[in-house]
Image (spheres, grey):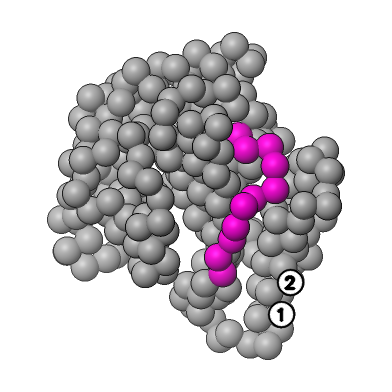
Amino acid sequence: MMAVLRGFADQLRRPSAILVISAHWEASVVTITAGDQPPLIHDYHGFPPEAYRIRYPCPGEPALAGRIQEMLEQAGIPARLDPRRGFDHGMFVPLKLMYPEADIPCVQLSLVDTLDAETHLEIGRALQGLNYENLLVIGSGFSFHNMQAFFEANTPEVEARNQAFENWLEQTCTDPSLSESRRWQLLAEWDRCAPYARFCHPREEHLLPLHVCYGLAGKACDSSVSTRILGKQSGMFYWGMVERGWTAAPL
């Protein structure tokens, strides 16, 4: 995964700013970091001491945060700014690999704690008109997130379930023959449409950053990468929207 993220950053034009939708932040309404220099939140437990000494001192981008809030509220989606909230590991872990210099302004956006799939598609769609030259949008989640399965034997049955869901997600996100209304419906009803949906995502917070990115792009993704993480197959999807001034890349 480290090589994939570094390679991905090498292929992109250096962004002017980065917006991260993190699976590790849920709020009652969409919330956006709005500080000039947000601190880091080491929101994990039981790791070696080095994991808590990680630093990523990138600046915030309050003007971008304010524009995001404005666009969400114009679309009827309640949103608020949080000038004190820091960046969690859904943001600083991938960015430390992709852009280790920590010199690109960043903003982080929360999930809504209802974890409703269509709500997160609508959040993305509300931001389609976001006008910010060379903005990179990262949906920081995981296409497979069954923590128990990560640490149990990787049996043929587990492999088959994992692969069936990944195949469904790949086809749903990449198939150009799907109408966008059908793609939207499949993602909105993913837990009923996808095979082994609740085995791969007992709780959906790690899938929903992808919904925001698809809602933002509104089209089939341009490319995808499959990799193995902790013995499980996982996909990354890329949308390039040069004409709108930004790129979306759910992890």
Front position in the image: 46 or 145:
145
Marker disc for residue 160: 1
- Residue 138 at x, y = what percent? 46, 45
CB contact under 8 Å: marks 1 and 2:
yes
Provide the secondary structure element on which disc 1 rests.
helix
Q: Amino acid at mark 1?
A: Ala
Residue closest to the eye, 129 or 210: 129
Horizontal relation, residue 12 to residue 170: left or right: left
Quadrant (top left/top right/bottom left/bottom right) for the N terminus? bottom left
Q: Nearer the viewer, residue 222 or 125?
A: 222
The x, y position of residue 118, in whole percent, is 71, 36
Above or below, 190 relative to 243: below
Q: Is residue 224 above or below residue 25?
A: below
Residue 134 percent coordinates (x, y): 41, 34
Residue with the mark numbered 2? 164
Residue 217 lies in magenta, yes or no? yes
- Asked if the stretch drawn in magenta spans residue 23, the answer is no
Residue type at tag 2: Ala
Quadrant position of residue 174 = bottom right
Q: Which mark is residue 15?
A: none
Identify which residue is drawn at 50% across, 55% down. 251
In the picture as drawn, the residue positioned furthest to the front comes out as 243
| Local crowd size for mark 2, using a 10 Å CA cut-off: few (<14), some (14–19), many (≥20) | some
Query: Neighbour class for label 1 at 10 Å: few (<14), some, many (≥20)?
Result: few
Residue for point 39% across, 22% down: 65
Residue 127 lies left or right of residue 168; in this view the side is left
Q: Can I make out residue 41 in this image?
A: yes
Q: Which residues are magenta?
A: 216-226
